[in-house]
Amino acid sequence: MMKKSIFAVAVASVLTLGAAQAETVLYGSIRYDYESKKVQKMDDSEKGIKRLTSNRVSNLNDAGSRIGLKGSEDLGNNNAVIYNLEWGFDGMAQDEKNDSKWNTRKAILGLTGDWGTITAGRQDNPFKVTIVDDSVIDGFNGGSYIFSSAAQRAMTTILTGAGNAYLNEDGSNDEEAYIDSITKADFSRVGKVIAYTTPDFAGFQANAAIMMDSNLYPANGEKNIDLWTLNAKYAYDLGANGTILAKAGYIQGKVSGNKNKSKAWGLFLGYSQDAFAVTASYADGNYKDKLINTDESSKEKSKGWDVGASFSFGPNYFSTVRAAYGENQLKVANQEGKDKVKSWAVGFEQKLSTRTRAWVEYGAEETKFAEKGSDKKKDNVVSIGMRHDF
């Protein structure tokens, strides 16, 4: 009933808002693939984190389908209201009642004009946009299970405090949750946010955003702003469809409780044209947390970097080969060594039209744990899929 209601509202909006002199567009993307994956299970023992037996498993998967509404209404004097609603869904759900997985990706309301743009609601994390969007990594179709940005993984461990965020009440570590946490690439979108973006000044643009969530108080000690970020980018046109893009950003906040404090900075540099693209990104920061049941604090440092290249060829450059590599590491206070994650991926994409494409991609990930005597965790996945945008 819920899914039908959402779709009915979307269609009704498209049909009726046009009469109110507003421009509204219904859009979406259906993305399905076959995946063959091997994810190794790990177990914490007295001799370190050990690898358990794992098998390669095949699956028919939804690779990130979504549907949305976006549009604007003219207010005069070059001002307009803008809005964007977007939901993700799992079109491969087996159990409709329990596995439908509808979720809100974006819910934005804002104002725009010659002075810039103000948006409020759930939206893309501007810092993640700085270090990930426009990269070769972001072009892979199979989703984060094929290849996730190491810079984004570093940002995630910084914001969550992976080394201490999974401590049990007795001070021991929840190893299973910790193992998963150091490979996550999260915070792609953030809710309870208000953001301002400047106009484009001859290729230069900047933005600032703040998040305020009363649910985080009093655990984090912040009564007002829980997270804030500043970002800037500059695009230089070289002619012949060639562009150099440079981006820089900073993010700071308290989002995981225990009066923590996270801060990180990031850089992105890329060159692109019709046939070729190369990009690099980097994120670096630290997390300081008050330990459970003590007056002591623990500091973690994390950083990650990515490089990628793509080559397009054939009629209209409809055929593309991509390759990417990334590393991130986490250093926890009083811990010998560092946890390290290495990942790489290659893929081939064939556009069948301007809105339809097929792909074959392979991604692998290796996690090395700082704890002595530990085995490496090695995962990999093959994805063969198709996507249609509308």
Image: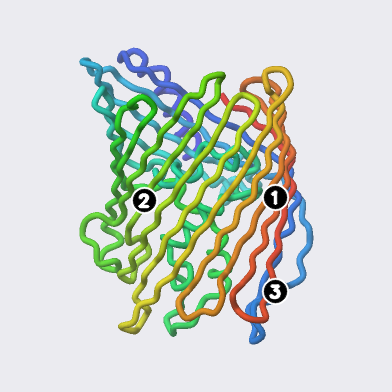
Q: Give SS at disc 3.
A: loop
Where does the image place residue 245, in percent across and percent down from the top left?
Answer: 48, 34
Q: Residues within 10 Å of mark 2 (few under 14, many from 20)?
A: many
Q: Which residue is mark 2?
A: 250
Comparing labels 3 and 2, the label whose residue is closer to the camera = 2
User: Which picture quadrant has residue 300?
Assistant: bottom left
Q: Residues within 10 Å of mark 3 (few under 14, many from 20)?
A: some
Q: Amino acid at mark 2?
A: Tyr
Q: Nearer the viewer, residue 326 or 124?
A: 326
Q: How many marks?
A: 3
Q: Amino acid at mark 3?
A: Asp
In this rendering, position of residue 176 left or right of residue 189: right
In this rendering, position of residue 303 left or right of residue 85: right
Q: Which residue is mark 1?
A: 363
Q: Is residue 104 visible?
A: no
Q: Which residue is mark 3?
A: 375
Q: Nearer the viewer, residue 121 or 312?
A: 312
In this rendering, position of residue 80 left or right of residue 251: left
Alpha-carbon span between mark 1 and mark 2: 29 Å
